[in-house]
Amino acid sequence: MPAGVTTVRAGSDGSLAAAAAVLRSGGLVVLPTDTVYGLAALPHLPDAVRAVFRAKGRPSGMHLPVLAATVEQVRGLGVAFGAAASVLADRWWPGPLTLAFAFDPGSGRPDWLAGRDEVAVRVPDHDFVRALLRETGVLVVTSANPHGTATPLTAEAVSASLGPSVGLVVDGGALTEVPSTVVSLVGREPVVEREGVIPAPDVVEALTGAHEDGLAL
């Protein structure tokens, strides 16, 4: 690992507490997921969120996606969690599916989501990450790579690419470079915006099958 980068193994003694402590202090943590390595921060800490953008060189107008431990945490964001979301979440959460939601006008939302038209959320199929999310609440998590480059496959390569901007790296071994599949539920019809681990035809099949079974989507 590059000098100065603190690294712990996912699931090792103290790793969960260490990651939570760095996040609560406003630091950034690299996390393994069931797809790619992610760069995480607590969403209600503005300086931490700005640090994510600086570390990646990500354009400021691009909102950060969110990871949650449970559907209940997702609903707590005030999203419009309709029938299509239920069908897809029942089949692929936890898993490599990101859903982009509009907001329910009748539900409250956290202050850090004020002014947003939508939010992209995923429940990852990774025990360590979900345990951390239960400890800290939802996190903003984006791929752990400089904007516009491929996501490194190992914790060591992530450390080399992001350098001292990261407070802690959680090593989960070699991962994939294939991201989650993204489905937008913001418009009148669900739209596959990015095909990742889950093939787009599988998403269409799940929604078509639910509709044929009489579910109003």
Image (tube, rainbow, N blue to C red):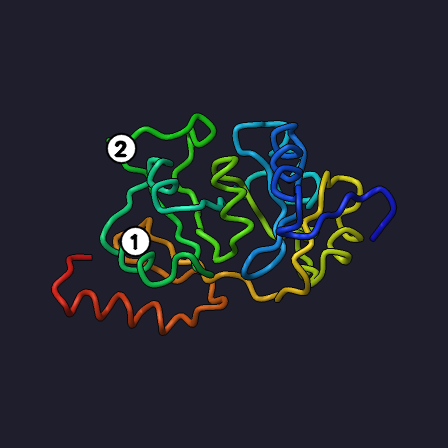
Left or right placement of residue 203 versus residue 30 in this view: left
Quarter of the picture holding the C terminus: bottom left
Based on the displayed image, in which of its 4 quarters is residue 87 positioned? Answer: bottom left
Of residues 58 and 217, the one drawn nearer to the viewer in this rendering: 217
Q: Is residue 159 above or below residue 133?
A: below
Residue occupying image coordinates x 72% and y 56%:
155
Q: Is residue 4 above or below residue 106?
A: below
Percent x, y of residue 184? 37, 54
The amino acid on which the numbered mark 1 sits, given as a three-letter code, is: Ala
Query: Which residue appears farthest toward the front when viewing the image?
Result: 13
Q: Mark 2 points at which residue?
A: 105
Residue occupying image coordinates x 80% and y 44%:
5
Percent x, y of residue 139? 52, 40
Q: Distance between the residues labelled 1 and 2?
A: 17 Å
Percent x, y of residue 138? 48, 39
Residue occupying image coordinates x 60% and y 36%:
20
Residue occupying image coordinates x 12% and y 64%:
214
Based on the displayed image, in which of its 4 quarters is residue 72 positioned? Answer: top left
Mark 1 residue crowding within 10 angstroms, few (<14) / some (14–19) / many (20+): many
Q: Which of marks 1 and 2 is nearer the N terminus?
A: 1
Q: Mark 1 points at which residue?
A: 85
Percent x, y of residue 203? 34, 67
Name the front one of labels 1 and 2: 1
Of residues 53 and 213, the one drawn nearer to the viewer in this rendering: 213
The amino acid on which the numbered mark 2 sits, given as a three-letter code, is: Pro
